[in-house]
Image (cartoon, rainbow, N blue to C red):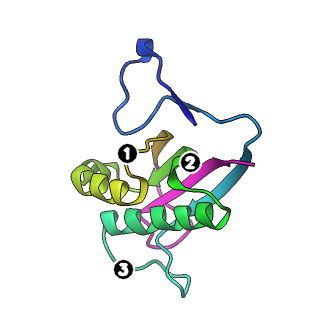
Amino acid sequence: MRIVNPESLGEPRGWSHGMLAPAGGRVLFVAGQTARGPDGGIVPGGFVSQFDLALGRVLRVVREAGGEPRDVGRMTVYVTDLAAYRGSLASLGEAWRRHMGRHYPAMALVEVQGLVDEGALVEIEATAVLNP
């Protein structure tokens, strides 16, 4: 993918303004992933551990389809506590780099009142474009 960051929009930090997928790529839509364990319940832990687990689940779907983290072109992160997100940026950055390296897709972060999975603090959905 080619990063598209127009100078007139300012330099993004930790995300990209746009990602241009290669011609002929296959699009993979990854459903919202939370910190669900094998039993279907939310794994105990705080905001950062839930983010780490949810992002890992997103990437398991991407890899199962034949992709890699660099193939993720768009991601939306839903959080129930924006203050917890802002207060955890350093630890979240470490978790991000473990999974994604220095790849920063086009992103949105949205604070929501609640998530479907009881006890979930974060949910992540993504779109990836895989080579044909």
Residue 112 visible in the shown view: no
What residue sits 43% from the left and 11% below the top? 8
* Side of 69 where 50 appears, left or right: left
Can you identify the residue that label 1 sits on? 102
Can you identify the residue that label 2 sits on? 72
Where is 69 relative to 103, above or below?
A: below
What residue sits 30% from the left and 69% below the top? 46
Name the kind of residue labelled 3 in the image: Pro
Label 1, label 3: how far apart the Cα atoms are: 28 Å
**Among the two numbered marks 1 and 2 on one chain, the one whose residue lies closer to the N terminus:** 2
Name the kind of residue labelled 1 in the image: Arg
Pointers 2 and 3 in contact (C-beta within 8 Å)? no
Mark 2 residue element: strand
Mark 1 residue element: loop
Q: Foreground mark, 1 or 3?
A: 1
Name the kind of residue labelled 2 in the image: Val
Please state the horizontal and vertical placement of residue 118, each as a whole percent of the image. Answer: 49, 73
* Side of 108 where 50 appears, left or right: left
Please report the bounds of the magenta region as a residue range.
111-132
**Among the two numbered marks 2 and 3 on one chain, the one whose residue lies closer to the N terminus:** 3
**Among the two numbered marks 1 and 3 on one chain, the one whose residue lies closer to the N terminus:** 3
Q: Bin the neighbour count of mark 3 within 10 Å (Cα to Cα): few under 14, some 14-19, many 20 and up.
A: few
Label 1, label 2: how far apart the Cα atoms are: 12 Å
Please state the horizontal and vertical placement of residue 116, each as a whole percent of the image. Answer: 57, 66
Can you identify the residue that label 3 sits on? 44
Nearer to us in this view, 67 or 78: 67
Residue farthest bottom in this picture: 39
Please state the horizontal and vertical placement of residue 34, each as a whole percent of the image. Answer: 50, 67
